[in-house]
Image (cartoon, rainbow, N blue to C red):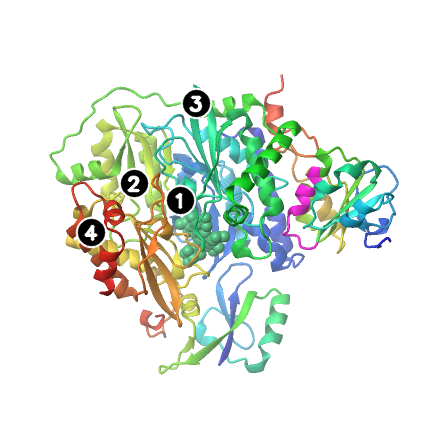
């Protein structure tokens, strides 16, 4: 059985990928592990993202839900997926606000479906806020320390 | 001292611009207060009892004269001519306007200062031993490691919405002068077979459920320190409780899982993280360390002329042994008898800045005891330093005595308070100064918090006082036997609380019990540990 | 009586609802009775006040508005330890009023 709880491509406001947006019904983490044909899954904050790792090959879309913007577990979920080599679409959904965008991007999200549409101009400015970064993260940007010490 | 390069500078400038934009959106109504609050908090801006309050970071408590002068200028330009130095080695301004905040932050940025990570559920400003770089007993200067952590934790993309705030302290000696084990993570830099590494403690904290952090690893190779910290944080971010903000600190996670299980999870994540490669390049630590190279100390006299007893007392009380025998570290007391602990006027800040320039290689420290420090003063210069301090009301010879009270802002400033803290500190310090008992009693750390959040470290006081609300009136609970130092312990409540007069009398009574019972060389805390709570209870309630 | 208080959004200053706007002086506060919720919602939405709330208060013997909770009395006057910075209170009975 498939529960259709995901966001559709037209709910995606920002997307940093060239492939076609995925339009599959999205299932919960539990049902994803049981169903061998699910290709899109939705992670809730309390889910253990690592149970998905054996199935990454068949997943085209992982949605990470932020029911409240202050609940930061989704940032770890995103990085864990990217660290495990997930290359599909990683979509942040729910309480996604302007000031979270740049951090989410760094953690590996490449599409954003905020439940309230964001001011386009403010959002683009937010994505570009940090010209440089201190930490290594999922986006593989060269860090400030890397730049300081390159030959 | 660390200096920003163009990258650090650009980061802080970007942050100011970002905040200016956020404040604009708030004033235009594009952000609700609920949405804006976490953003302003991440820039150190609280809404307190009387106004907005701005908390400015002083990473590991180290600043120079130019920065101190800027703090004075901020106090005059945007506030009411003073600031409050805190137990977190920060400074707080009590009367900042939202519409001025971005300008104040921009001014701070010109001297490499900011208010980043002084609030919010992120990794907070990193604290360190205030004697770092000067103390005779340190293995290395802990500040380069603290600076490495500062950079790693600044705007960390994964750890900005943690379950709760996260405080890290770094020390590098057996003695603990930073309450290291009362932090979410405490790091002690150690040497083993000549190799530098980090000892990690996790899950300490104060607040309503005080806990002492257990050791979670006795040696992390120094070129894996950031990776290990990242693993600690990731486990906390994923599994720290989010259902109840009073149970959301890492201490509860470590306690509920048990240290062994937390360690197991961290080790697993650490092994994984090592393969991901998040550690900064090794040369980065070396680059940072160069900024902390010891200044050019010169030989000189090792003793002072003790003919002025006031000066001699100040030297005995307020100076601390230095690595170099012709120098000491000199504590600038922000605890005049009857004064407000930690407060300094803009004039006092400017004076202190001048002294730092003239006598301490342009360096100052903010101590977690709400005092300031000149880390490197030539013994030969002590008379001149003391005289200048004394004239400015900064020369109280009371470090670590009962007059050196830590008190949080309490109900005079803080919207979370149950009771006022400052008036108690004022009355107690005044009383002990007047009766001359301060010296008789010797080392006695008294710490006062106006509510259970414990910003005044009352759990760690030899004597602790906690303000509680008793049917709408201020009431105070007394506790005994705490310590934030290497002999760390949590204070125990004596019994029923007191009103303001009652708690002041109670403090005198417990010092009476101590004076009657002490044996040679015992501090209050030692006597308490030897004789236990009963004699004190008897005197208070018997 | 029930009165309303909050902080000014731009400056942070403590303010009191006087029936038509927000005053710096607690003595200007008026009884809002049943209208508290409505006024709070409207004024906050219009950003004329930040995080406002309703509190109980009385008129004391000297005719001054006296918030029921000590916290709001401290807000009305200023920090008790910095009396030099107090909200101008010519008509106040003094600092004992707070405690
Ligand atoms: C006036 C505004 C302040 C507010 C609203 C405030 C708020 C809080 C809160 C809510 C906590 C408890 C955190 C928890 O247990 O989860 C806390 C703890 C603490 N605060 Fe403050 N605080 C304020 C001022 C200060 C000041 C002035 C200092 C330094 C003197 C300070 C230093 C600390 C420390 C050291 C802790 C204990 C750390 C711990 O819980 O482990 N705070 N504060
Ligand atoms: S201990 Fe309580 S009263 Fe004191 S500053 Fe912290 S939150 Fe405020």
Q: Is residue A73 magenta?
A: yes
Q: Nearer the viewer, mark 2 or mark 3?
A: 3
Q: Position of residue B199 (x, y in %)?
A: 46, 32
Tag 2–tag 4 contact (CB < 8 Å): no
Q: Nearer the viewer, mark 2 or mark 1?
A: 2
Q: Position of residue B422 (x, y in %)?
A: 33, 57
Q: Chain of mark 2?
A: B
> Looking at the rendering, which quadrant does residue B298 occupy?
top left
Residue identified by numbered label 4? B514
In the rendered structure, the answer to whether residue B321 lies left or right of residue B258 reads: left
> Looking at the rendering, which quadrant does residue B294 occupy?
top left
Depth order, front residue of A69/B183 = B183
Structural crowding at the residue carrying mark 4, measured as other residues with C-alpha within 10 Å and reported as few (<14), some (14–19) or many (≥20): many
CA separation in Å, label 2 and label 4? 28 Å
Tag 3 and tag 1 share a subunit: yes
Q: Is residue B5 magenta?
A: no
**What element does badge 2 sit on?**
strand
CA separation in Å, label 1 and label 4? 41 Å
Q: Residue at x 17, y 50 (%)?
A: B517
Q: Looking at the image, tell me whether mark 3 or mark 4 is earlier in sequence order.
A: 3
Residue B192 has which mark? 3
Residue identified by numbered label 2? B332
- Classify B30 as above or below A142: below
Residue A142 visible in the picture? yes
Q: Looking at the image, tell me whether mark 1 or mark 4 is earlier in sequence order.
A: 1
Q: Chain of mark 4?
A: B
CA separation in Å, label 3 and label 1? 43 Å
Q: Nearer the viewer, mark 3 or mark 1?
A: 3
In the rendered structure, the answer to whether residue C61 lies left or right of residue A144 reads: left
């Amino acid at each position: 059985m498939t529960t259709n709880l995901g966001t559709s491509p037209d709910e995606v406001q920002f997307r940093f990928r060239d492939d076609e947006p995925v339009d599959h019904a999205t299932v919960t983490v539990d049902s994803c592990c049981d169903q061998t044909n699910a290709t899109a899954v939705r992670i809730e904050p309390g889910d253990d993202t690592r149970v998905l790792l054996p199935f990454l090959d068949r997943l085209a879309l992982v949605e990470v839900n932020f029911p409240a913007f202050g609940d930061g577990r989704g940032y770890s979920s995103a990085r864990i997926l990217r660290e495990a080599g997930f290359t599909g679409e990683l979509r942040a959904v729910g309480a996604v606000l302007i000031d979270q965008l740049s951090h989410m991007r760094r953690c590996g999200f490449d599409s954003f479906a905020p439940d309230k549409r964001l001011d386009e101009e403010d959002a683009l400015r937010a994505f570009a806020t940090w010209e440089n970064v201190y930490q290594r993260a999922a986006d593989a940007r060269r860090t400030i320390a890397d730049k300081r010490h390159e030959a | 001292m660390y200096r920003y390069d163009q990258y650090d500078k650009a980061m802080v400038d970007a942050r100011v611009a970002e905040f200016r934009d956020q404040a604009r959106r708030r004033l235009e109504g594009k952000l609700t207060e609920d949405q804006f609050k976490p953003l302003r908090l991440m820039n150190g801006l609280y809404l307190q009892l009387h106004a907005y309050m701005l908390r400015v970071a002083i990473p590991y408590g180290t600043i120079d004269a130019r920065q101190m002068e800027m703090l004075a200028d901020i106090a005059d330009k945007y506030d009411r001519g003073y600031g409050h130095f805190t137990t977190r080695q920060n400074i707080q301004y009590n009367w900042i306007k939202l519409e001025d905040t971005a300008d104040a932050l921009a001014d701070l940025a010109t001297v490499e200062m900011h208010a980043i990570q002084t609030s919010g559920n992120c990794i907070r400003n990193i604290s360190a031993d205030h004697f770092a770089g000067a103390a005779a007993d340190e293995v290395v200067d802990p500040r380069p490691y603290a600076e490495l952590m500062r950079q790693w934790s600044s705007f960390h993309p994964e750890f900005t919405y943690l379950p709760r705030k996260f405080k890290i302290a770094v020390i590098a000696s057996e003695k603990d002068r930073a309450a290291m084990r009362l932090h979410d993570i405490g790091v002690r830099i150690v040497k083993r077979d000549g190799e530098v590494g980090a000892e990690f403690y996790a899950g300490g904290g104060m607040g309503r459920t005080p806990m002492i952090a257990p050791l979670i690893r006795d040696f992390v190779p120094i070129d894996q320190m950031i990776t290990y910290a990242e693993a600690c944080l990731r486990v906390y971010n994923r599994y720290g409780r989010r259902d109840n903000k009073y149970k959301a600190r890492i201490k509860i996670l470590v306690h509920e899982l048990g240290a062994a299980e937390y360690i197991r999870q961290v080790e697993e994540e650490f092994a994984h993280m090592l393969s991901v490669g998040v550690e900064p390049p090794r040369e980065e630590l070396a680059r940072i360390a160069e900024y902390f190279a010891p200044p050019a100390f010169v030989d000189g006299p090792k003793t002072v002329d003790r003919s002025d007893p006031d000066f001699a007392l100040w030297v005995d009380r307020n100076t601390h042994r230095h690595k170099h025998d012709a120098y000491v570290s000199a504590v600038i007391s922000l605890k005049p008898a009857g004064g407000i602990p930690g407060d300094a006027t803009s004039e006092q800040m400017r004076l202190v800045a001048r002294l730092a320039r003239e006598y301490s290689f342009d360096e100052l420290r903010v101590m977690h005891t709400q005092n300031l420090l000149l880390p490197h003063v030539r013994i030969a210069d002590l008379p001149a330093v003391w005289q200048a301090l004394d004239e400015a009301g900064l020369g109280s010879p009371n470090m670590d005595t009962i007059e050196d009270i830590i008190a949080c802002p309490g109900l005079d400033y803080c919207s979370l308070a149950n009771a006022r803290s400052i008036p108690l500190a004022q009355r107690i310090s005044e009383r002990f100064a007047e009766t001359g008992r301060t010296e008789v009693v010797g080392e006695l750390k008294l710490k006062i918090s106006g509510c259970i959040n414990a910003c005044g470290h009352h759990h760690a006081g030899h004597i602790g006082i906690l303000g509680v609300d008793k049917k709408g009136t201020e009431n105070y609970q007394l506790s005994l036997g705490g310590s934030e130092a290497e002999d760390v312990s949590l204070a125990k409540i004596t019994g029923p609380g007191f009103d303001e007069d009652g708690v002041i009398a109670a403090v005198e009574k417990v010092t009476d019990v101590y004076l009657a019972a002490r044996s040679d060389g015992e501090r209050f805390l030692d006597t308490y540990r030897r004789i236990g709570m009963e004699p004190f209870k008897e005197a208070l309630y018997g | 009586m029930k009165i309303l208080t909050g902080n000014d959004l731009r400056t942070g200053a403590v303010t009191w609802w006087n029936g038509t706007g927000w005053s710096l002086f607690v003595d200007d506060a008026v009884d809002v009775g049943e209208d508290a919720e409505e006024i709070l919602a409207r004024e906050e939405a219009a950003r004329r006040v930040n995080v406002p709330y309703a509190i109980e208060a009385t008129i004391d013997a000297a005719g001054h508005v006296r918030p029921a909770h000590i916290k709001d009395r401290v807000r009305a006057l200023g920090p008790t330890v910095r009396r030099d910075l107090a909200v101008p209170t010519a008509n106040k009975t003094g600092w004992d009023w707070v405690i």
